[in-house]
């Protein structure tokens, strides 16, 4: 009873923490509340009968504390050292570890079920002729009934589903980490990729069915192996531009896998935590896909966003990018009534958020109305830009979501785009042939002047040319984001 009450309190802390995370002003407190819930769930687990009452209780405790020490130490160290630029990679990696843990639990439980199922055969052989008597038959029937109770169809089904989903989340998240960290090329497809993935999926399901009926270690080996490969092959064709959606999807899958394994183990904390994470991740995935005006199937199977890099500096219509000096931009911004700043992943790479906020404060001191516009999929994970700006000390009341800020661009004299590309691409509105047509964008082209800070003249992460950069109202400030922000600061200080 005590353990279940603690698990119930854990669930309340998880839900309240998640609720607080819905707002930037309370997100830090929400993380702490959820953390307290996890600490409570961990501590009370030590008193669970399966651990404390087991004959190997001492060994269990040693292994648990060893795992907590190693895992906690590594996560604490990496959390302290990670740069905000690398947060998406870390989230993808840790999410993969969660899926892998759920898959490992499933593997242990399924193998244990297989051992229990096979235990009746040597018992029959040991009984010899007694097994043929009425008493022997009755004992065997009772043993079979006990085995059937221990290995129910529901437990087997949920165990295999959790194993399948968790394994995919594990290997897929590792690929997402490798892509985000630059360790894997963005373009990697095999011939007839979708057909190959379909065949691999069917083969995995078949071995799952075989495992359900036999619990054979060989069948389970192929089941887990194929699921690992499927997670890899379904993720490798997906480009970096779609990573926010993929990270959210794998987060949801990890939560779902944990919930399924919680049912198998009869652990209420795992069921609740997994369900909360799974539902939140599913909603976030839906919101991310909606923000790109694309279905999840299109994200997974279209191969969109697999090309990118440095391209030509002239548009298909013959326009050219027009460069501008920092001094001229400084004057333009200093004497504007309203400036809207649009950050993107390029700002994160340049670690320019502190300089950008310093620039903003100078403009605010001069009476300029400065606002920040955030696209839902800006960066490499949901909320990436919000985290960067919060780290730099940007107040929440000057940061606006896309739907709240778009109408303001017509009233702004300058829209400063730093490191963003696809989220400000007007092709999404004007070009039905574009791969991003229909995706909601930030309407920076409605400003009187558009200044784009960009390292080079190439296309964005999606590989799609942006006609905004060739527009009549657009000027390009080429260079590193942090360096250019520094030059703008100096230019304004000299006025």
Image (cartoon, rainbow, N blue to C red):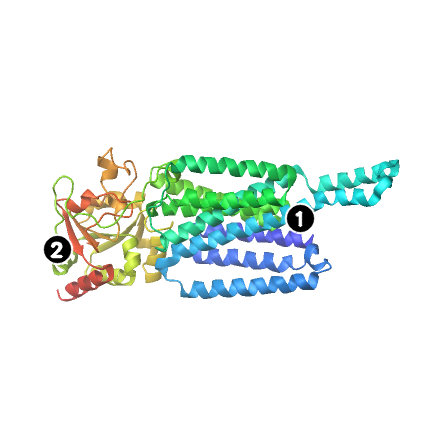
Question: Is residue 477 at least partly visible in the picture?
Answer: yes
* Label 2 close to label 1 by CB (< 8 Å): no
- Identify the element where label 1 is drawn: helix
- Identify which residue is drawn at 18% across, 63% down: 487
- Identify the element where label 2 is drawn: loop
Residue 129, picture quadrant: top right
Front residue (pair 265, 19): 265
* Picture coordinates of residue 395, whole percent (x, y): 33, 58
- Image quarter (top left, top right, bottom left or bottom right) of the C terminus: bottom left
* Picture coordinates of residue 459, whole percent (x, y): 23, 47
Q: Residue furthest top?
A: 432
Q: How many marks?
A: 2
From the viewer's perspective, tell me whether residue 73 is left or right of residue 475: right
Of tags 2 and 1, which is closer to the observer?
A: 1
* Picture coordinates of residue 195, whole percent (x, y): 41, 34
- Identify which residue is drawn at 47% across, 35% down: 199
* Picture coordinates of residue 91, whole percent (x, y): 43, 54
From the viewer's perspective, tell me whether residue 484 is left or right of residue 141: left
Q: Distance from label 2 to label 1 (Cα)?
A: 68 Å
Pointer 2: what residue? 324
Front residue (pair 10, 459): 459
Question: Is residue 266 at least partly visible in the picture?
Answer: no
Pointer 1: what residue? 112
Q: Give the class, few, some or many, for how many residues have Cα within 10 Å of label 1's Cα (few <14, many ≥20).
A: some
| Label 2 or label 1, whichever comes before in sequence order | 1
- Identify which residue is drawn at 36% across, 38% down: 191
Disc assigned to residue 227: none
From the viewer's perspective, tell me whether residue 5 is left or right of residue 441: right
Q: Give the class, few, some or many, for how many residues have Cα within 10 Å of label 2's Cα (few <14, many ≥20).
A: some
């Amino acid at each position: 009873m005590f353990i279940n009450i603690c698990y119930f309190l854990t669930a309340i802390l998880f839900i309240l923490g998640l609720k607080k995370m819905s707002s930037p002003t309370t997100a830090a407190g929400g993380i702490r509340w959820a953390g307290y819930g996890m600490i409570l769930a961990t501590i009370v687990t030590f008193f669970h009968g399966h651990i404390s009452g087991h004959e190997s209780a001492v060994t269990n405790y040693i292994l648990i504390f060893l795992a907590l020490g190693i895992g906690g130490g590594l996560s604490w160290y990496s959390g302290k050292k990670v740069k905000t630029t690398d947060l998406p990679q870390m989230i993808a990696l840790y999410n993969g570890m969660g899926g892998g843990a759920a898959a490992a639990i499933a593997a242990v439980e399924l193998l244990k079920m297989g051992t229990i199922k096979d235990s009746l055969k040597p018992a029959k052989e040991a009984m010899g002729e007694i097994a043929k008597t009425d008493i022997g038959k009755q004992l065997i029937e009772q043993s079979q009934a006990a085995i059937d109770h221990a290995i129910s169809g529901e437990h087997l089904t949920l165990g295999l589903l959790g194993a399948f989903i968790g394994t995919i989340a594990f290997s897929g998240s590792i690929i997402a980490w490798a892509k985000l960290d630059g360790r894997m090329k963005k373009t990697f497809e095999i011939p007839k990729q979708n057909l190959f993935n379909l065949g691999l999926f069917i083969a995995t399901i078949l071995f799952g069915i075989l495992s359900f009926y036999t619990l054979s270690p060989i069948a389970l080996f192929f089941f887990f192996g194929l699921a690992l490969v499927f997670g890899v092959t379904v993720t490798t064709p997906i480009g970096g531009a779609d990573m926010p959606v993929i990270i959210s999807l794998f987060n949801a899958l990890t939560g779902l896998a944990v919930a399924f394994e919680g049912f198998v183990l009869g652990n209420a904390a795992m069921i609740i935590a997994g369900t909360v994470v799974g539902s939140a991740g599913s909603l976030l995935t839906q919101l991310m896909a909606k923000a790109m005006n694309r279905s999840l199937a299109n994200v997974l199977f279209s191969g969109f966003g697999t090309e990118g890099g440095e391209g030509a500096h002239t548009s298909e219509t013959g326009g050219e990018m027009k460069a501008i000096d920092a001094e001229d931009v400084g004057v333009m911004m200093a004497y504007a009534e309203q400036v809207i700043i649009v950050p993107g992943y390029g700002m994160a790479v340049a670690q320019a958020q502190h300089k950008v906020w310093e620039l903003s404060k100078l403009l605010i001191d001069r009476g300029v109305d400065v606002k920040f516009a955030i696209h839902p999929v800006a960066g490499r994970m949901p909320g990436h830009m919000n985290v960067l700006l919060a780290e730099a000390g940007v107040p929440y009341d000057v940061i606006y979501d896309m739907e709240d800020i778009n109408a303001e661009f017509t009233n702004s004299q300058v829209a400063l785009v730093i490191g963003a590309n696809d989220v400000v691409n007007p092709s999404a509105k004007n070009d039905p042939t574009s791969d991003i047509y229909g995706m909601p964008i930030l309407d920076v082209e409605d400003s009187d002047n558009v200044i784009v800070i960009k390292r080079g003249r190439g296309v964005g992460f999606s590989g799609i040319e942006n006609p905004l950069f060739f527009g009549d109202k657009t000027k390009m400030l080429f260079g590193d984001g942090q360096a250019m922000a520094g030059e703008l600061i100096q230019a304004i200080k000299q006025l």
